[in-house]
Image (cartoon, helix red, strand yellow):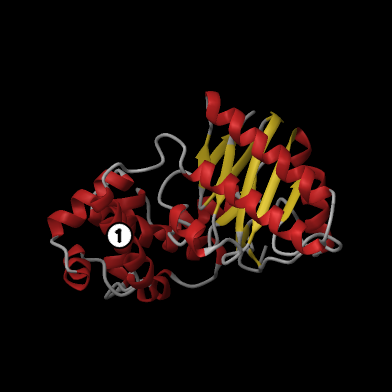
């Protein structure tokens, strides 16, 4: 915690595990805690990850937060935290048994990344619970992945590629569970382009009309595509992204509300405060005090 009472957030790059195949890490919870300690990190501290982190629980209960939203992970559930998100374990890792699969952007092939939508910022809940045959398939893939990761058989190059392919199978299965995909291909493509544009430009423009003009869609098309894929309108989607970044900056920096508003593209502090109060139900100062006080 810094001198102003803000909970520090650690920027965490992907680092290969010593003596393990390069490119990914497949760990049980004690191994995940040991990995954090070996890098001088507190595994229960808030971290902004520079890699994908897949967490699953085999027994017990694990509470996590991803970008200020609390989640409870129970047996068979999976949590997918993506690069750039702030993740924190909110209960002791020792209270549950499970596994973690970590891999950096660019680890999987271009085709796999495209089909699994790895290039998109997260828009849905990071929590998924496979059921029935899907659950059995995912468990089987994870068992194979853990076994292969622990035991090098044959040439190292072959071992590295087998691990990579098994991670790809796991990611593809999780990304395409029932309920995680939009059936409208055209809407999905429009939303993909809109989402990427918002991630790039949300500090400069908060208007759907601006994105529609740049992307060559009508406002109605973007709104319909966003509602079909993300469950909300296009304007709400933009505002949600701006609000998330405002919360991140309020909790994890000592920037003033005025400076945060300027960074996020608001013309003055009053407009930013009105936006934040309307969307969050409290002032930026009130949120900062409350959130900093509950994240110790």
Residue 262 placement: quadrant: bottom left
> Which residue sits furthest top?
132
Badge 1: residue crowd in 10 Å (few <14, some 14–19, many ≥20):
many
Residue 10 in view (yes/no): yes
Residue 48: x %, y % from top left: 59, 62
The answer to whether 216 is drawn above or below residue 65 in the figure is below
Q: Residue at position x 42%, y 46% from top?
A: 124
Q: Residue at position x 30%, y 41% from top?
A: 183
In-image side of 37 versus 120 (left or right) = right
The residue labelled by disc 1 is 238
Residue 150: x %, y % from top left: 83, 48
Q: Residue at position x 61%, y 28% from top?
A: 136
Residue 259: x %, y % from top left: 41, 75
Q: Nearer the viewer, residue 134 or 193?
A: 134
The answer to whether 132 is drawn above or below residue 169 in the figure is above
In-image side of 275 versus 5 (left or right) = left
Q: Nearer the viewer, residue 70 or 53?
A: 53
| Numbered marks: total | 1
The answer to whether 284 is drawn above or below residue 185 in the figure is below
Residue 91 in view (yes/no): no
Quick one: quadrant of the N terminus?
bottom right
Tell me the element at label 1. helix
Q: Residue at position x 42%, y 63% from top?
A: 246
Residue 62: x %, y % from top left: 66, 36
């Amino acid at each position: 915690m810094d001198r102003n009472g803000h909970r520090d957030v650690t920027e965490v790059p992907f680092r290969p595990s010593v003596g393990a195949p390069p490119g990914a890490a497949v760990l049980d919870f004690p191994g995940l805690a040991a990995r954090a300690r070996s890098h001088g990190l507190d595994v229960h501290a808030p971290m902004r990850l520079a890699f994908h982190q897949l967490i699953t629980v085999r027994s017990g209960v694990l509470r996590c937060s991803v970008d200020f939203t609390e989640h409870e992970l129970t047996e068979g559930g999976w949590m997918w935290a993506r690069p750039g998100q702030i993740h924190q374990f909110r209960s002791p890792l020792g209270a549950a048994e499970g596994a973690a699969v970590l891999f950096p952007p660019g680890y999987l092939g271009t085709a796999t990344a495209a089909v699994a939508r790895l290039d998109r910022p997260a828009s849905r809940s990071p929590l998924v619970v496979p059921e029935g045959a899907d659950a059995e398939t995912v468990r089987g893939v994870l068992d194979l992945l853990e076994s292969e990761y622990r035991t090098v058989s044959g040439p190292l190059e072959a071992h590295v590629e087998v691990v990579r392919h098994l991670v790809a199978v796991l990611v593809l299965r999780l990304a395409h569970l029932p309920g995680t995909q939009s059936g409208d291909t055209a809407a999905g493509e429009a939303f993909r382009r809109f989402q990427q544009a918002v991630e790039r430009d949300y500090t400069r423009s908060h208007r759907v009309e601006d994105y529609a003009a740049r992307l060559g869609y009508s406002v109605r098309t973007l709104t319909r595509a966003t509602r079909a894929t993300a469950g909300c309108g296009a304007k709400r989607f933009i505002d949600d992204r701006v609000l998330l970044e405002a919360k991140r900056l309020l909790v994890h920096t000592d920037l003033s509300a005025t400076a945060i508003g300027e960074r996020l593209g608001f013309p003055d502090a009053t407009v930013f405060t009105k936006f934040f109060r309307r969307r969050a139900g409290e002032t930026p100062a009130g949120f900062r005090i409350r959130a900093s006080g509950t994240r110790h």
